[in-house]
Amino acid sequence: MAGGEPAGRGAISRRGALGGAVAGAAGIAATRVDPAGAKPPKGPGRKRSRDVVVVGAGLAGLAAARSIREAGRSVVVLEARDRVGGRTLNHPIGHREVVEIGGQWVGPGQTRVLEMIDDLGIETFDTYVEGKSVYYRNGSRSEYEGIIPPVAGPVLVEILTAINDMNAKAATVPVDAPWNAPEAEDWDGQTLKTYLDGLGLSAEARMVVELGITSVFAVEPRDVSMLFVLLYIAMAGADFNNLINTTGGAQERRIVGGSQLISLKLAKRLGNAVRLEQPVGLIRRTRTGVSVRTPSGTWPAKRAIVTVPPALMGGIDFKPPLPANRAQFDQRMPMGTVVKCMAFYDAPFWREAGLNGMTTSDQGPVRLTYDNSPPDGRPGVLLGFIEGQDARDLAGATDQERKAAVVECFARYFGSEAESRMTGYVEKSWAADPWSRGCYGGITPPGAITGYPGVIRRPFGRIHWAGTESATQWGGYMDGAIQSGQRAAAEVLAKL
Amino acid sequence: MAGGEPAGRGAISRRGALGGAVAGAAGIAATRVDPAGAKPPKGPGRKRSRDVVVVGAGLAGLAAARSIREAGRSVVVLEARDRVGGRTLNHPIGHREVVEIGGQWVGPGQTRVLEMIDDLGIETFDTYVEGKSVYYRNGSRSEYEGIIPPVAGPVLVEILTAINDMNAKAATVPVDAPWNAPEAEDWDGQTLKTYLDGLGLSAEARMVVELGITSVFAVEPRDVSMLFVLLYIAMAGADFNNLINTTGGAQERRIVGGSQLISLKLAKRLGNAVRLEQPVGLIRRTRTGVSVRTPSGTWPAKRAIVTVPPALMGGIDFKPPLPANRAQFDQRMPMGTVVKCMAFYDAPFWREAGLNGMTTSDQGPVRLTYDNSPPDGRPGVLLGFIEGQDARDLAGATDQERKAAVVECFARYFGSEAESRMTGYVEKSWAADPWSRGCYGGITPPGAITGYPGVIRRPFGRIHWAGTESATQWGGYMDGAIQSGQRAAAEVLAKL
């Protein structure tokens, strides 16, 4: 989830603008309850049986539950946290306004999340893009208007050529079977860094492209398989611009009331089918179905849908144990690293200066910023992302040190007012969150896609898999989470 | 653990011979007991406090416990399985003989395990290497004597050149800080496959080198960071031959009574300090130390040593939660994939034909074989490894199908007697084992070493880390497991 505005990415299409749209997916249920052979508690702990038990009340789990309920089947959703929404999370800032410290953006082509938003009577508004953007490189700050960032023509050509090449390659990757891409072996045998090394880009073009990659995946180019990057592009319509753009892309629109509202409304409709603070420790096969263990007891059902990201799957015991390939694949889809940071102001003062709040910078820890103010511009909110290695390097810093580093970046891009007028600050490190352990989503290093083909969506007996990591459209985004939940629900309904 | 005999690797030094020497390390304690807030049971469940609680009774944990006990401190070792030994495991074959279905070999330079063996009064014997080896390529079988495999001179030169290049690079990698290697960024930014692609080897040289890599790591060259491979070589004395050789290398000697005997004897000396079937679900910080939860209760101590491999760490809850970087590093060290397979015969009939039981083949699923008979040659035991992608491809096969495929390989290399005279068969898929989920050890894809420098051994409060994955000498081997345990014990003792 997350697109990104690499420097001047605006140039490439309408308007580059970052991602960080933390997917509202699973991030659920990694706690444990029970060792191997223990018996389920009797009495009050034993629950009535449902058709389906869903593990995780992020967008994937809630979308799945909704489909199951609509088909006239019974369902319960077990959520480890004390809230729904997974990697989407509203943060109240007073006066009934919220900001999102998780995934937030939606854009064209994300038909499932847009449809869901519509169904739930939720409204959207455009990400703020009026005015000039800031470009910061080699210690020098400049402003630019429109869609052409201030890179020299040849650099722009390099960037466009690289993106076009990735797009053309992505067009050959089947979204539901990337291991069958004609050059899958080659692409899954190398890192994106190796691919970029081969392009021989100038330093500036390389910086821009790498910033785009990091903004989409929250990892470094060395961390990710070239095939995974191409799959991701393919899942977003085979155009990298769709991932990184604001207008026309994945960061085009925001949600009135905050993106968590989707999950909150879905959960409200599901009523007491959604159970919070129910970390799943054990999923056991029974004679007639499955039995899911949480601290409050066992939840029997005919089938289960598990929306936990692969990286957190080890927190659940399965009896019988997961097949070797499933367990090993789950070892091979680590999460990205991002800290989402926002500073608050009485008003978005940068707008008065003709700035739209967007920055592309080669200097961290915050290299990408956005105007994240509520629809009416009160308060003013500057949003900055600390991504990939920047986030890891600051993981050991104190909250104060990290905040100071972020505000220093804001001041560098928007002047000393960014510091002097600041009225509040909030940040969220998703890698530190035990129920997500990273954002925006899972990525795969080389070897995982071709080494374990099909494993991510293959049901294990009566256990089915969802979560944005298992999507085939907009994987990693809120849209992918919903798609995965609906797909898993369809699988289950066909078997009930 | 595991060296490997790539085809004709024998040529390179005394005698190539495979690894598969599954490290007798942790593979422990990934089960879970208790959700977030639950209180420790009172009464009989509450245990008296020790100085140190060790999680895992593999070689790392037992070596740590021994050092702690010898220093006059109290210790308890909690083991999830119903046995000690971790990734070492004896399999009785009658007449007081055993074969090892886990790690088995030791060799020169592995001073810690050799010293431990000596201390415990255990004996070793030479791996059987008398006679000719089999080389199988492009459907054609040949035999060869001595240390020169039947590859053409130029191919041999290619192989030697590649190994020399890796050795020279490995010599620049600090074993305790590989992220500081002069070219760490470059090497950790690419897969080993990318490196090999750059060498432009002939098909035969490539096959031999790749077989060597797979035999050492049980993964494909695409799966592993070049820097990790160099670190591994560095930890084995900066000579790849040390990893892959029989005589003179990591597969030189075997252990009378089986490698698990080391753990069994260590455990016996520790007496009731070793507790089996105690999967650890929760490690909690307390005012004065730590408290470790298993099904039978809580185990308070001043400090903890956790020997679980990173890939299984998600099975343990930590309160407070692990730091972001530790949790994310643990997502980035997946386990190798190997099935260790042995067929039994009244006698090692291949010896009569002048064969030593070793094979190097380009055709799977078994590409490497060994004579794994007990010291007196009764019964005869053929050992074959299914490694990396071969193992994943066969993970969904039935036991019968896999056995048939293995025996077919044995017959291909040693004639129809390998099938007609077979009296028994045993195999162990370590990826299917819930307490190991792979062997020989953890590997890192690109980005993990440089992305999370130092994390693997950095204590978290009063929790210290061991396990062969955290070693700095012979990491991945039994020797590394012991080193890691002794190092963690020294850390703890310095703080008590």
Image: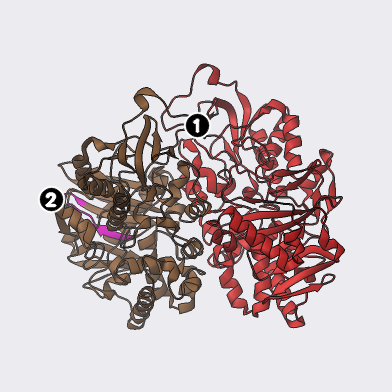
Chain colours: A brown, B red
**The label number, if any, that marks residue A121 in the structure image:** 2
Q: CA distance from mark 2 to mark 1?
A: 45 Å
Residue B356: horizontal and vertical position, in percent?
Answer: 82, 63
Residue at 67% from the left image edge and 26% from the top image edge: B74
Instruction: Give the image location of residue A304, x and y in percent.
Output: 36, 44
Q: Residues within 10 Å of mark 2 (few under 14, many from 20)?
A: few
Residue drawn at point x = 52 percent, y = 69 percent: A189
Q: Amino acid at mark 2?
A: Gly
Q: In which chain is the residue bearing label 2?
A: A
> What range of the chain is rendered magenta?
A368-380
Tell me whether the residue at label 2 lies in contact with that at label 1, contact meaning CB atoms closer than 8 angstroms: no
Mark toward the viewer: 2 or 1 = 2
Q: Which amino acid does the dot numbered 1 rest on?
A: Arg
Side of B459 relative to A270 (left or right): right
Mark 2 element type? loop
Decide whether the magenta segment is chiefly helix, strand or loop.
loop
- Regarding residue A28, the answer to whether it shows in the image is yes
As displayed, is residue B262 above or below residue B286?
below
Left or right of residue B355, residue A421 in this image:
left
**Disc 1 is attached to a residue of which chain?**
B
Tell me the SS state at disc 1: strand
According to the picture, the residue beneath numbered tag 1 turns out to be B284
Residue B91 has which mark?
none
